[in-house]
Amino acid sequence: MAIIVIDAGHGGDTRVGGSSPNNATAPEGTLEKELALDIAKRVQRILSAMHDVRMTRQTDVNVGIAARAHVARDAAADVFLSIHFNGFSNPSVQGTETLVWPGTRPTEKSYVLANLVQKATVGATGYRDRGIKDERRLGVLNPQNHVAKTARCLVEISFITGPGKTSAESDERRLKDARYKDSIAEALAEAIEAYL
């Protein structure tokens, strides 16, 4: 049984320890923090039958960046996955990307996890593969906030400000479908299982 920490990005109403309450907002008002928590809970439900799954938050509260990582550090977790959604001023931008700490090599466990997460998420969304990125020093992925054994990455599932799979729908509308959200959660859970 592995220890897995799922981090639902953002939360609450105020900035806490470097974590903003919300980043992306969809055209009809859906918030990234709500979608991230929804998907995180679905992943938790899937994986809890086989593993010790812990959450950095279970409700609409914000948790500081270091505190999120320390949930994994204190548990000596095998996997830390942070779930986010992107937003952009240009509503035509769409795609999936996964982030790792700068300088992470393709042979390292965090990159291996990120690669599995990226492929699985692109498979679930059908959106453009924007690849694995390592140019941002995100505190939740900082090696100093984790034990060495923890594979860690952050997935930006899609741009909630962008189009859906057809020109007639938005990503926001698509994300109102529980079956679609389940398919994303199942993809993330399968990626973690494949890593383990």
Image (spheres, grey):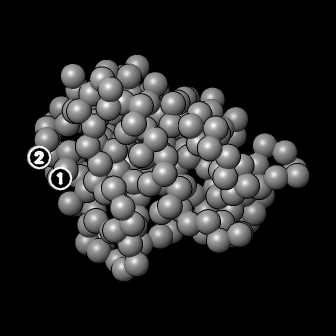
Name the residue rendered at 51%, 30% in the picture: 186
Residue 21's place in the image compared with 184, above or below, is below
What kind of residue is marked 2? Asp
Name the residue rendered at 51%, 68% in the picture: 23
- Point out residue 192 in the picture as x, y percentages from the top left corner: 39, 28
Residue 18's place in the image compared with 175, above or below, is below
Q: Which residue is mark 1?
A: 70
- Point out residue 42 in the picture as x, y percentages from the top left corner: 46, 41
The quadrant of the picture occupied by the C terminus is top left
Q: Quadrant of residue 97?
A: top right
Q: From the viewer's perspective, is 1 left or right of 109? A: left
Q: CA distance from mark 1 to mark 2?
A: 6 Å
Name the residue rendered at 29%, 74% in the picture: 16
The quadrant of the picture occupied by the N terminus is top left
Characterize the local packing of mark 2: few (<14), some (14-19) or many (20 or more) Cα atoms within 10 angstroms. Answer: few
Report whether residue 84 is seen.
no
- Point out residue 8 in the picture as x, y percentages from the top left corner: 39, 54
Q: Quadrant of residue 15?
A: bottom left
Q: Nearer the viewer, residue 24 or 89?
A: 24
Q: From the viewer's perspective, is 152 left or right of 181? A: left
- Does the residue at mark 1 contact the one at mark 2 (Cβ under 8 Å)? yes
Circle 1 — which element?
helix
What kind of residue is marked 1? His
Residue 16 - label: none
Q: Quadrant of residue 103?
A: top left
- Point out residue 177 in the picture as x, y percentages from the top left corner: 67, 46
Name the residue rendered at 33%, 56% in the picture: 58
Q: Which residue is mark 2?
A: 74
Report whether residue 6 is seen.
yes
Circle 2 — which element?
helix
Q: Nearer the viewer, residue 45 or 153?
A: 45
